[in-house]
Image (spheres, rainbow, N blue to C red):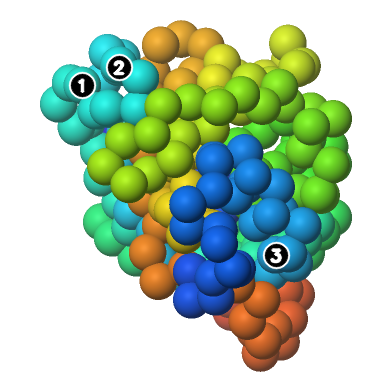
Amino acid sequence: MQKSHIAKLAASLALSAMLLPGIASASALAQFKSFVSSTKSAKGDFEQELLNAKSNGANKVGSPSSKSSGTFIFARPGKFIWTYKQPYEQLLQADGETLFIYDKDLNQVTIKKLGDALGSSPAAILFGSNDLEKNFILKEGEAKDGVEWLEATPKSKETTFAQIDIGMRNGVPEIMKLQDTLGGTSLLTFKNFIKNPPAPAGGFKFVPPKGADILKE
């Protein structure tokens, strides 16, 4: 899988140590709405797995085609630092207005306007505004292995994703399954999810590494 493809997925995307009383047994929709309303920022670790085109509900089907992992921190709306550490180092960072993609191997920074891209993309689940029902149709899915599943279907036809399944446990997203319009599937698993942590040092302002090539799109 090429770096640009993974970066594009994460960008459309670029998403618990604090439990709310009674939230563990709540439905996926109730947990999700509580998460959105109470979470202004969060951080944690992620694992991303790109699968072949076959998929089945909330279960993995097909052999993995690519895996990556790293860390994230975000603040609503539209501010985040999404860092790939394996299998190569890459940084996606947004300050609410501009998206910066830094490829360490190439020492290259690509700059894009964040614009309304978060609206009906998977990234809106984590990084966007609280008004998600404006851009998604939300529906309860089936519970499995202690995870309550929520189905989010983008209302906009101008999106590369057909459906986003969100697995909630203990009031925070544990896994997101992204199904694109071409039949591909990607899984994002979150670990060490901490709600409303202190802001990162330096905030979300991006400083280009010394000597890096700058590309604007």
Instruction: From the viewer's side, name the closer residue of 132 and 160.
Output: 132
- Seen in the picture, residue 196 relative to 45 is either above or below; the reply is below
- Taking the spot 65% from the left edge, 65% from the top edge, the residue there is 74
Give the farthest residue toward the left: 63
Report the amino acid beneath label 3.
Thr
Q: Is residue 117 above or below residue 93?
A: above
Tag 1 near tag 2, CB within 8 Å: yes
Q: Specify the label residue 39 is tagged with.
A: 3
The residue at 37%/50% (across/down) is: 189
Q: Which residue is at 40% across, 11% downward?
A: 183
- Residue 139 visible here: yes
Position above or below: 133 against 61: below
- Asked whether residue 9 appears in the rendered view, the answer is no
Q: How crowded is mark 2: few (under 14 residues within 10 Å), some or many (20 or more)?
A: some
Q: Earlier in the sequence, mark 1 or mark 3?
A: 3
* In this view, the mark in front (2 or 3): 3
Q: Residue 77: horizontal and vertical position, in percent? A: 80, 57
Which residue, given by chain and number where applicable, does mark 1 sit on? Answer: 61
Disc 3 crowd rating (10 Å Cα; few below 14, some 14-19, many 20+) is: some
